[in-house]
Amino acid sequence: MALGRSLRRVLVMDSGLPCNRFTPHSHNFITHDGEAPAKIARKARKQVERYDTVHFHKGLAVEGKKRRQVLR
Ligand SMILES: Cc1cc2nc3c(=O)[nH]c(=O)nc-3n(C[C@H](O)[C@H](O)[C@H](O)COP(=O)(O)OP(=O)(O)OC[C@H]3O[C@@H](n4cnc5c(N)ncnc54)[C@H](O)[C@@H]3O)c2cc1C
């Protein structure tokens, strides 16, 4: 969200297996106490999707390459 708000083009790639997926309720996250982790994640995604600089892709990253950026 912070990068998207700073007008950076952002790709969020996620294979969708968060480590807390087996727990029914989240605690100690103020304002979300007792909520299901998946519900918090959906809400977070909805808020980030408001920024059209940010794109989502469901998938597993298997390698990364540094590309030379051409500044205009
Ligand atoms: C059982 C359990 C209960 C918990 N309960 C609480 C709680 O009550 N309160 C609390 O504050 N914290 C809790 N935690 C801790 C909390 O879940 C973690 O701190 C938090 O999920 C970490 O977020 P993260 O985004 O760093 O990692 P994750 O939530 O694990 O997300 C990582 C994501 O990256 C994806 N990924 C990994 N590798 C790749 C790849 N190569 N390409 C694409 N995607 C990839 C995964 O699929 C996953 O979706 C709990 C954790 C566990 C395990």
Image (spheres, rainbow, N blue to C red):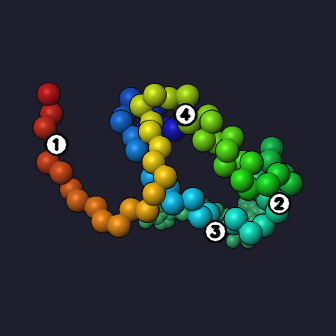
For mark 1, what is the residue?
A: 69
Q: In what element is the residue under mark 3?
A: loop
Q: Kindly report the distance in space between the C-alpha atoms of the residues bearing marks 4 and 3.
A: 22 Å
Q: Position of residue 65 (x, y in %)?
A: 23, 59
Question: Residue at 64% of width from left, 68% of height from top?
Answer: 19
Depicted 64 relative to depicted 31: above or below: below
On whether ligand 1 comes within 8 Å of the CB at mark 2, the answer is yes
Q: Which circle marks residue 25 in the picture?
A: 2
- Mark 4 vs mark 1: give the one in front: 4
- Name the residue type under label 1: Gln
**Earlier residue among tags 2 and 1:** 2
| Count of marks, rendered view | 4
Q: CA distance from mark 4 to mark 2?
A: 24 Å
Q: Identify the residue under disc 4.
A: 49
Query: Looking at mark 3, is its residue's CB closer than 8 Å to ligand 1?
Result: yes
- Alpha-carbon distance for marks 4 and 1? 25 Å
Task: Tell me what residue is drawn at x 45 percent, y 52 percent.
Answer: 13
The reply to whether discs 4 and 3 touch (Cβ–Cβ < 8 Å) is: no
Q: Which mark is residue 59?
A: none
* Whether residue 30 is visible: no
Tags 4 and 1 in contact by the CB under 8 Å rule? Answer: no
What is the three-letter code of the residue carrying label 2? His
Q: Secondary structure at mark 1?
A: loop
Q: Secondary structure at mark 4?
A: helix
Q: Earlier in the sequence, mark 1 or mark 3?
A: 3
Left or right of 21, for residue 26: right
Which quadrant, please, contains the C terminus?
A: top left
